């Protein structure tokens, strides 16, 4: 008889199958919770996006409807001078290093450093006594030779009469003629010596060769100077008139040449280095005969009257060349010109006080002004301040510029 093990034959307890079933239920619950969380997050994000879009739309609408304060200026029509501006420096019209032309000791210096002198004013006196002695010696020599010449001519007349009467040999007459010629030549040489002595005596009195201003004294009284000395006694510079050399881009040369082709004298203004203070007005005198290849510029020279000495040699200045005057040009302040992907434009304020974009064609920019070829007309109102806040069609509160019209150019431009 077979006996079964009661332990092995017993049926499994219900608790042994419970763990797998609870694990599956737990997973389902967790996945459901996670799905709910994800769905809630998506709904929340969408809700926030809709709220942000609605807020942005409301802000854009408010911006569109907001009245923007701007400053405006009138488009005017007037004559506009065209200036070409360049950098330059002042140079003396004449510069002379005064040197001695004779050797000698300096007796006196008759000028003060920085003194204005006229042509012919005595600057330095060299000891004149050696040259006076040479003059007196030459005058004595010519007196002697003139007496000998007078006697020789009298003898020549006698010999001529005797020769005609065949009382003396012809050779004796011709010899006397040669003696007269030699003495005559000696007299002329004596006269040249006198002239040289007088010239040296004049050279001992050193005068200013030009009207101008003296510089620093280079040699003191008592020094012996020589005509072969490398240095001079003083430098004299002429300041009235005075020259200004300045450069402009080589691209401006055709217009300058055309403006001067008929012999017209173009006006040039000299300004201080910062461009705020005018120093003088002159005329263009020279256009250099070559272009500087390294800088692609052309050099020009202008002559200025300088009675007040506002210009000084080696002074750095801004030079403005008046090229022409545009007649009845349409002008707006340069601040009204805006640049966009489609080119230049300006905001024009209409009668309904809305700002509209108006494409414009800028012919030239002259200082604070822009010359307009097309796009706006005299009487239009353009925005010159506050453009950054404007959108096409925006309502604006225009405030006219204080001057009532575009300012005149302070500088030049193209």
Image (cartoon, rainbow, N blue to C red):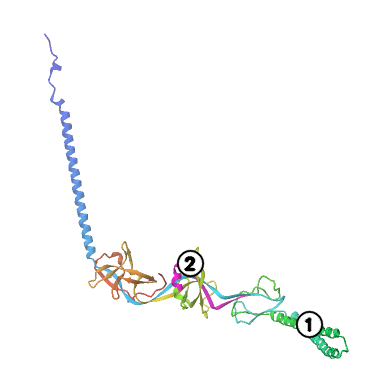
Residue placed under numbered mark 1 in the picture: 186
Most distant residue in the right direction:
167
Q: Regarding mark 2 in the picture, which secondary structure is present there?
A: strand
Is residue 310 inside the magenta stretch?
A: no
Quadrant placement of the N terminus: top left
Residue 123: percent from the left, percent from the top? 65, 79
Q: Regarding mark 1 in the picture, which secondary structure is present there?
A: helix
The circle drawn on residue 316 is none
Task: Give the image quarter of residue 130.
Answer: bottom right
Q: Which residues are magenta?
A: 235-257
Residue 169: percent from the left, percent from the top? 87, 86
Task: Give the image quarter of residue 256.
Answer: bottom left
Q: Is residue 212 above or below residue 62?
A: below
Q: Is residue 239 visible?
A: yes
Residue 206: percent from the left, percent from the top? 67, 79
Left or right for 23, reference 83: left
Count residues near mark 2 (Cα–Cα under 10 Å), then give few for <14, some for 14-19, many for 20+.
some
Residue placed under numbered mark 2 in the picture: 297
Most distant residue in the top direction:
1
Q: Main secondary structure of the magenta part?
A: strand
Task: Give the image quarter of residue 23.
Answer: top left
Q: Is residue 29 above or below residue 120?
A: above
């Amino acid at each position: 008889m077979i006996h079964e093990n009661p332990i092995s034959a017993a049926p499994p307890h219900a608790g042994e199958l419970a763990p797998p079933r609870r694990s599956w239920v737990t997973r389902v619950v967790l996945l459901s919770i996670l799905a709910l969380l994800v769905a809630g997050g998506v709904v929340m994000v969408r809700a926030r996006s809709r709220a942000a879009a609605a807020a942005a739309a409301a802000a854009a609408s408010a911006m569109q409807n907001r009245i923007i304060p701007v400053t405006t200026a009138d488009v005017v029509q007037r004559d506009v001078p065209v200036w070409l501006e360049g950098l330059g420096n002042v140079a003396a019209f004449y510069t002379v290093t005064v040197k001695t032309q004779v050797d000698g000791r300096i007796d006196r210096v008759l000028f003060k450093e920085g003194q204005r002198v006229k042509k012919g004013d005595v600057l330095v006196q060299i000891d004149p006594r050696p040259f006076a002695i040479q003059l007196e010696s030459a005058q004595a020599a010519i007196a002697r030779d003139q007496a000998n010449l007078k006697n020789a001519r009298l003898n020549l007349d006698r010999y001529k009469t005797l020769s005609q009467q065949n009382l003396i040999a012809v050779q004796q007459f011709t010899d006397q003629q040669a003696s007269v010629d030699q003495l005559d030549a000696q007299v002329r040489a004596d006269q040249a010596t006198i002239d040289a002595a007088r010239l040296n005596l004049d050279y001992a009195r050193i005068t200013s060769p030009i009207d101008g201003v003296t510089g620093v004294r280079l040699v003191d009284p008592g020094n012996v100077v020589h005509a072969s000395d490398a240095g001079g006694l003083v430098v004299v510079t002429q300041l009235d008139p005075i020259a200004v050399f300045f450069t402009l881009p080589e691209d401006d040369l055709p217009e300058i040449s055309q403006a001067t082709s008929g012999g017209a004298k173009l006006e040039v203004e000299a300004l201080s280095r910062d461009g705020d203070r005018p120093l003088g007005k002159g005329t263009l005198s020279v256009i250099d005969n070559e272009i500087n290849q390294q800088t692609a510029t052309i050099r020009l020279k202008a002559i200025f009257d300088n009675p007040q000495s506002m210009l000084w040699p080696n002074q750095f200045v801004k030079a403005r060349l008046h090229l022409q005057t545009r007649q009845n040009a349409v002008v707006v302040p340069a601040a009204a010109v805006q640049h966009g992907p489609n080119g230049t434009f300006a905001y024009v304020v209409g009668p309904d006080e809305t700002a509209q974009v108006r494409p414009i064609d800028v012919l030239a920019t002259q200082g604070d002004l822009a010359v307009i070829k097309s796009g706006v007309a005299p009487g239009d109102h353009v925005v010159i301040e506050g453009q950054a806040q404007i959108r096409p069609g925006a309502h604006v509160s225009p405030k006219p510029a204080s001057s009532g019209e575009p300012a005149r150019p302070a500088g030049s431009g193209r």
